Amino acid sequence: MKIIYLFFAVLLVVLQSSLGFMRAPNNAVQCKQAGGTCSTDHCPPTSTRAFGRCQQGIPCCRTVVS
């Protein structure tokens, strides 16, 4: 039974390191890889929302599926 605690500890460490892939994009390349587009001023109001930044002040927009 004690091995289960060790297993959960190792699993937690592995999952924490993989959470870096869930971060919001902060440059144009990461935005494109995440399936977004860089907008000039703001995201178009119809079914898109900002989920990161391409550059300072430029949002990365992605289509929201309802």
Image (cartoon, grey):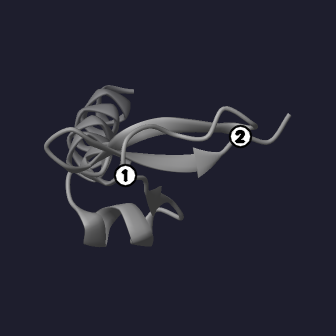
The label shown at residue 31 is: none
Instruction: Compute the Cα span from label 1 to label 2.
Output: 19 Å
User: CB of mark 1 within 8 Å of CB of mark 2?
Assistant: no
Instruction: Residue at 42%, 71% (x, y): give it.
Output: 33
Which label's residue is closer to the chain start, 1 or 2?
Answer: 1
Location of residue 32 (image quadrant): bottom left
Instruction: Residue at 39%, 27% (x, y): give it.
Output: 1
Residue 41 vertical position relative to residue 26 in the rendered view, above or below: above
* SS at badge 2: loop
Location of residue 17 in the rendering, given as x and y in whole percent from the top left corner: 20, 49
Instruction: Residue at 80%, 42% (x, y): give it.
Output: 65
Q: Nearer the viewer, residue 1 or 26?
A: 26
Q: Is residue 19 left or right of residue 51?
A: left
Q: Is residue 4 left or right of residue 56?
A: right
Q: Nearer the viewer, residue 26 or 23?
A: 26
Q: From the viewer's perspective, is the residue at label 1 or at label 2 nearer?
A: 1
Q: Is residue 25 left or right of residue 26?
A: right
Disc 1 marks which amino acid?
Thr
**Residue denoted by label 1:** 40
**Residue denoted by label 2:** 64
Disc 2 marks which amino acid?
Val
* SS at badge 1: loop
Location of residue 64 (image quadrant): top right
Q: Nearer the viewer, residue 14 or 25?
A: 25
Image quarter in which the C terminus is found? top right
Instruction: Residue at 74%, 38% (x, y): give it.
Output: 47
Residue 22 vertical position relative to residue 37 in the rendered view, above or below: above
